[in-house]
Amino acid sequence: MIQDLLDEAMKMPPNERIEFAQLIMASIDCEEDKIRKIWLDEVKDRRQAVKEGRSKLIDFDRLYHED
């Protein structure tokens, strides 16, 4: 099951994988509710900024594998 989920996630564009990973990290139960809410709000704010053109995404592969 975990491998299937990972395989599906890897099919997502890099920016969507980042957002997905941030949402998963923010949902970890060991965090305090206040911290979890702050992270979720941050992810939502960043997503909205991209949609509105106030922020630009950087392709992970280009960022870390440019020669």
Image (tube, rainbow, N blue to C red):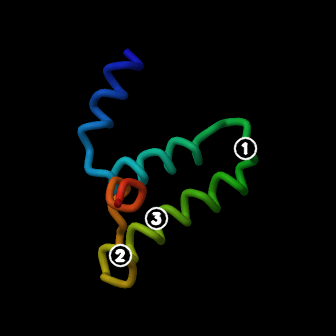
Q: Earlier in the sequence, mark 3 or mark 1?
A: 1
Residue 56 spot, x, y in % from top left: 35, 76
Residue 58 spot, x, y in % from top left: 36, 66
Q: Earlier in the sequence, mark 1 or mark 2?
A: 1
> Looking at this view, is 23 or 67 the one in front?
67
Q: Residues within 10 Å of mark 2 (few under 14, many from 20)?
A: few
Q: For residue 2, what is the image quadrant?
A: top left
Q: Residue at x 36, y 28 (%)?
A: 6
The residues bearing labels 1 and 2 have C-alpha atoms spaced at a distance of 29 Å
Amino acid carrying mark 2 in the image: Lys
Is 3 placed left or right of 42 in the picture? left
Amino acid carrying mark 1 in the image: Glu
Is 11 placed left or right of 41 in the picture? left
Q: Earlier in the sequence, mark 2 or mark 3?
A: 3
Q: Residues within 10 Å of mark 3 (few under 14, many from 20)?
A: few
Q: Give the residue at mark 1.
A: 31
Q: Residue at x 63, y 38 (%)?
A: 28
Furthest residue to the bottom? 54
Furthest residue to the front? 67
Q: Give the residue at mark 3.
A: 44
Q: Secondary structure at mark 3?
A: helix
Q: Secondary structure at mark 1?
A: loop
Q: Give the residue at mark 2.
A: 56
Amino acid carrying mark 3 in the image: Lys
18, above or below 54, in the image: above
Residue 51 spot, x, y in % from top left: 30, 74
**C-beta proximity under 8 Å, tags 1 and 2:** no
> Looking at this view, is 49 or 57 the one in front?
57
Q: Residues within 10 Å of mark 1 (few under 14, many from 20)?
A: few
Is 65 placed left or right of 29 in the picture? left
> Looking at this view, is 48 or 4 the one in front?
4
Q: For residue 62, what is the image quadrant?
A: bottom left
